[in-house]
Image: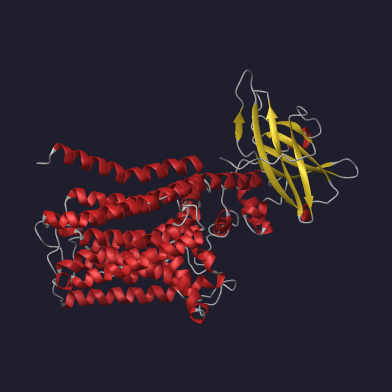
Amino acid sequence: MKRPLQGLADLSLIFAAFLPPLLLAVLINNCWVNIPVWDDWDTPGLFLKEYFVQGHFSWRLLFAQHNESRLVVPKLLNWVVAHFSGWNIRVMLAMTWLTAVAIFAQLLWLLRKTVRASATVRWCFAVALSAVLFSPNQSENWLMSIQLVVFLPPLCLISCLVVQHSSLAYRTKVIMCALLSLVSTFSNSNGILCWILGAPLPWLSHKGPDGKPTGPAKLDRVSLTWTAIYLLGLIATALVYFWDYTRPPWHPAMGSALRNPVEAAQYFIAWLGNPFCRGMGFDPLKSAFALGLCVSAVLVIFLLAIWRRLQWISSGHGWIQLHPWAVLTLYGLVSGLVTVLGRVGFGIEQAISVRYIGFSCYVYLGLIGLSACLSDTLDDRSPATIRRWTPAWIAGAVLCFTIFVPSWLDGRAAFHWRRIGCEEMKLAIRFLSLIPMNPALARVYPDPDHLRQIAIPLIEKEILQPGLVGSWPLQKIQEPDGDDSGWFTVKRGPAGCKISGWSIISDQDFSPGCVLVTTTDAGNRERLETAAILSWPVRARGTGYLCVSGFNLDLPSASFPQAARLKLYSADLKRQKLFRLIEREGNSEVPDMP
């Protein structure tokens, strides 16, 4: 029977383990914006346009490459979602979070299956797994719908590991792992690793009465037959995947890593340190390189520790325990090596892309699991041994805390900045019919013409529903609802102009959400040029009502004549009201968000 204090400690650890996914869910709910961005317009944008606009299911687009990947599964998921809720990005983001929760649930199962330490020790490691997996530092992966592809291959791989460590018959394991590997292959470019790393091992056995590993099983003819079937499935999938496969012409050649081994090594080390290199007040690339060196040293220490326990591992019990966590670590490391081969030509700075955290974090998850397995005998050690190791454990916990907390805080800030950026992009789409040449469209997709060719037909079919702004602003700019409701300044330069200012409103029936920018030609005719969101509202204290909102925006010179006269309006899109802002000299820059 557990002592009351021990039971309370276990409950606290369980709460701490499930707190990160709950906090992340709140962040996602507060910051998601229902608008496709960047790669979404190619995948699944083109596929959805072909089906809902052209009226036929395109197998060619379904299997078409997206960079190095064939994203068949994500396209089908978006197609199903579009049938029931339109092209709703928030459904895909919720699916991403649920995928991560499924990964975490299976990691907990593997902890229970492979770690023989006490429940308290297991939940300590579960807290670490949760903190790494659900960290907001990979904000782009959580807030971009296409980044579901980052989570699908590891979900399939970990599912394969769970299947392997279950008591199912070997032929059932082969069928399930083959299906999971097939899904993984057509989810992302590194998904084919699931066939290799998640291959069902015929000699893996879990037949003990307590559910613990009992040692290797003997091979027989049936096992060899099903292993051969699995290999045939791998070969067939690879042939289909690489049929008519071409390297993206804008990507550097894979041989560049071999020609520049030092740069490749630096890229890989920075890639290893990418998950927690932000928020500590140092240059992220230098922090990533330093942390990557630490992770490399930890990997060497683990290899030495495993070598020292080689007899325990070769007995059959040890390697069965270490197997799933070693596979996770290998998945992260091999994904990093593949990234180096395909991306080192872009420069070392690209190694700390936020999107890559979705791959490199599995090195950390694998190392946490290996630590849990190697600490199995901690409960059996003498008090003197435990006292000798206690300072090392405390130092490690303090070090992890000082790295995790700043990274979490930085990730939370990145969520809010990402939301502001997505709101600006959604505003550009909402004005697509009124401002087809809006320079802000380049933020949504680098090629605005391509964007319009996809977005407009999908909006007409009501598959994409951004909430288009009607034609009322064209009438309102002739007779606005009020004047002198704020001010702005313009700084002109050779590349364009920078506009900044404040919207100051004392009308409770007017809640401005954006500013509209117009130009006036020689005939005194106004034309809408762009729209920009207000950075954030500040409600002034004191008697009466006063709402102050700031804005900053840049207009490139190519989008309007240098001598054009600019006019700005504060707009309430919900109530369809406009108030004119007054131009003044001086500096009206909006300070950075606190």
Residue drawn at 12 percent across, 53 percent down: 383
Q: Position of residue 440 (x, y in %)?
A: 68, 50
Q: Is residue 12 above or below residue 42?
A: above
State the image coordinates of residue 108 (x, y, percent, origin top left): 26, 52
Residue visible at 29% across and 73% down in the picture: 230
Which of 521 and 488 lies nearest the eye of the viewer?
488
Q: Is residue 162 above or below residue 440?
A: below
Residue at (24% x, 66% y) in the render = 323
Viewer-nearest residue: 262 or 572: 262
- Which quarter of the rendering shows the N terminus? top left
**Residue sitting nearer the eye, 213 or 270:** 270
Q: Whole-percent x and y of residue 91?
A: 46, 46
Q: Quadrant of the C terminus?
A: top right
Please, which residue is most extreme toward the right here? 523
Task: Residue at the far top: name it.
Answer: 543
Colour scheme of the picture: secondary structure
Does residue 168 appear in the picture of this structure?
yes
Name the residue: 15% across, 37% down: 4
Q: Nearer the viewer, residue 157 or 409?
A: 409
Q: Is residue 95 visible?
A: no
- Rendering coords of residue 479 (x, y %): 80, 30
Residue 303 relative to residue 256: left or right = left
Number of marks in the rendered image: 0
254 relative position to 480: left or right:
left
Judge left or right: residue 566 versus residue 468: right
